Image (cartoon, coloured by chain):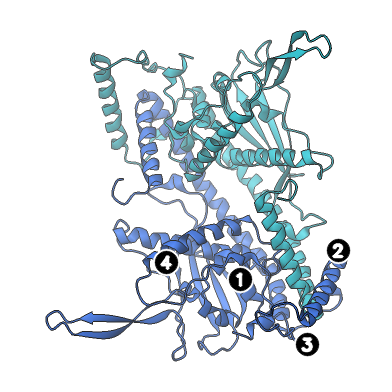
Chain colours: A blue, B cyan
Amino acid sequence: MKGGMTRSEMLVEISNRLHAEAIASLPPNVRRRIRALRTLQKEFVDIEAKFYSEVHALECKYDKLYKPLFEKRSQIVKGSYEPTDEECLNPWRDESEEEELARAVKDTNITDATDKSKPEEKPAEPPMDPNVKGIPDFWYNIFRNVSMLCEMMQEHDEPILKCLEDIKVQLHEDPIGFTLEFHFAPNDYFTNTVLTKEYSMKCKPDEENPLEFEGPEIYSCKGCEINWKKGKNVTVKTIKKKQKHKSRGSVRTVTKSVQADSFFNFFSPPAMPEDPNSTIASDIQALLTADFEIGHYIRERVVSRAVLLYTGEGLDDDDDDYEEEEEEEECSEEESEDEEPAPRRRGKRGTKGPPENPAECKQQ
Amino acid sequence: MKGGMTRSEMLVEISNRLHAEAIASLPPNVRRRIRALRTLQKEFVDIEAKFYSEVHALECKYDKLYKPLFEKRSQIVKGSYEPTDEECLNPWRDESEEEELARAVKDTNITDATDKSKPEEKPAEPPMDPNVKGIPDFWYNIFRNVSMLCEMMQEHDEPILKCLEDIKVQLHEDPIGFTLEFHFAPNDYFTNTVLTKEYSMKCKPDEENPLEFEGPEIYSCKGCEINWKKGKNVTVKTIKKKQKHKSRGSVRTVTKSVQADSFFNFFSPPAMPEDPNSTIASDIQALLTADFEIGHYIRERVVSRAVLLYTGEGLDDDDDDYEEEEEEEECSEEESEDEEPAPRRRGKRGTKGPPENPAECKQQ
């Protein structure tokens, strides 16, 4: 293999070369006409860029219409607003099914509790307080249900994410972009009430490669500082390392801080590499590409369809795909782990499982 | 396995069930609040549907701006318009590279022709006529380069697709949708000059499942009749079958017509099943889903970026993915082939190869 190239990259390079040679073998006047088509294509993307700018303006217009709905959702989730009976009607749904299931689940719970023959592996969960406020752990359960988010969430992140009260999107008109705001209840971990991640987009064909334009694209992002309370920073871990003195042969143990896996690393994205052709640049670029996808996904799917991700109605096959990759990745991580055992990334096969019963949380 | 379900469908069903149970186990007032969030979600999709309608109106507006560019492209491809020198400038490109490659290719050709020691497997291709009109086989080469199209193209389709002069999209405003027009030069195969495929879209949440709405969706399509010239219909083949008389035991051979694999089946999509729950309905639905994807792809990618698919500049990784699946599929097809050998679907590994040298075509 050519240095550092994947098989797929190599195939692309070979294919590009073959295409270029085929074009080069055409008579000059045919190649000249192809150049004329490229000129037309350039005119096309210049107009298309204006189309996408108009779409973004439309998005900003509609964002104002969505905002009151999201605000009311936030209040219902937090428990600061109790919906009226009328607001709770879902006329398109067959609610008798849900009622029946609710009765069945209740009956099962009672049977379980009195069934002495069943081995009790862990103490029965106390039922959720029927007078509980709002919808407990709403956003935390979305993190559990959506593979892309679940994969980022470590065990030590969970109690913090249970304090997540809302995710909001603020759109920026000029230059275009958006900010994700993660609103937290007062908590024991950091003093911030809002953590932000800002994405900058561009909606213009690149000067050097104008024909590659396919619409607005995220090109950079900015996190925020988290003011961790003492000893609560889950994004660092201390590791102990034994060092042997070169000549004396004596051994000492040093402690050093290294980055720990955590969802909260999302707020410290790597800086864009200055030299885009360096070896490290391609690693960073891969990290940023993944980050942009997550930001885009949260904006497009999570914020606008939160209730469906909470109930599971809106989870799709993509979640499954993502999960499989996650499992593979985990193996290789195991091999490369060379320092002291860190909180393990959990192999959440049940990612698409039910929203956790909030009563469970109290046990952590 | 449960009757007819794939593993993935079963997992989805189990997951849905678990989600439903988890929701059912919540206290009634929490479930009530979730219903209020669904009501808000319904309001959201109703507004979102208006947003998408506005986007479609914008698309229609921009379509008028794109049309003259596509018209000029068509004329250059057909050779009815010769671009000016200024129109052939691609100032953002390094054209010296192309020139250099062209010289190299030319030199190689000359060497090849005079190198007597090289085994000559087939006669050398005559170079393309330097005075050729337009860009020969422009659309045919796009079919060859794009896996999704290449897979549909059979060997017997190729000479017909070499007569394809343009693909145009006509947008419909109300009800929304679009028609793909395939314009052909006069040919020996059919008398039509245009073959059409019409797609109907809807941009309203479904009444029974409003929350599933995610934007405009193709929901039906209509082909067109092809007036095949006598003996030229590539979409049917005749097969011979031996029949044994039940009592007498005598054998006779009957001939019957069956559908043959062909790109031109694209113009005879299956009718929507009347009973969507019948066994055959899910097969038809799968065929239609694939058809809608192709229609969408031609509209979104092929027509708007034709030159980049011709030169190979605009082919992406998706093409690769598609190809791998194709290879797998072919194996199973081999097993199920039970009648007399039909023109085989070609395992085009070189799908992303160079646009065929038009000189080659003359040999077929």
Badge number at residue A94 = 2
Q: Amino acid at mark 2?
A: Asp
Q: Amino acid at mark 4?
A: Glu
Residue under the image location 41 percent in, 80 percent down = A236
Rate crowding at label 4 as few (under 14), some (14 to 19) or many (20 or more) other CA atoms within 10 Å. few
Rate crowding at label 1 as few (under 14), some (14 to 19) or many (20 or more) other CA atoms within 10 Å. many
Going from N to C along the chain, the mark reached first, 3 or 1, is 3
Q: Amino acid at mark 3?
A: Asn
Badge number at residue A334 = 4
SS type, badge 4? helix
* Chain holding disc 1: A
A342, above or below B42, in the image: below
Q: Which residue is mark 1?
A: A144
Q: Position of residue A346 (x, y in %)?
A: 52, 71
* Residue B225 lies in quadrant: top right
Badge number at residue A131 = 3
SS type, badge 1? helix
SS type, badge 2? loop
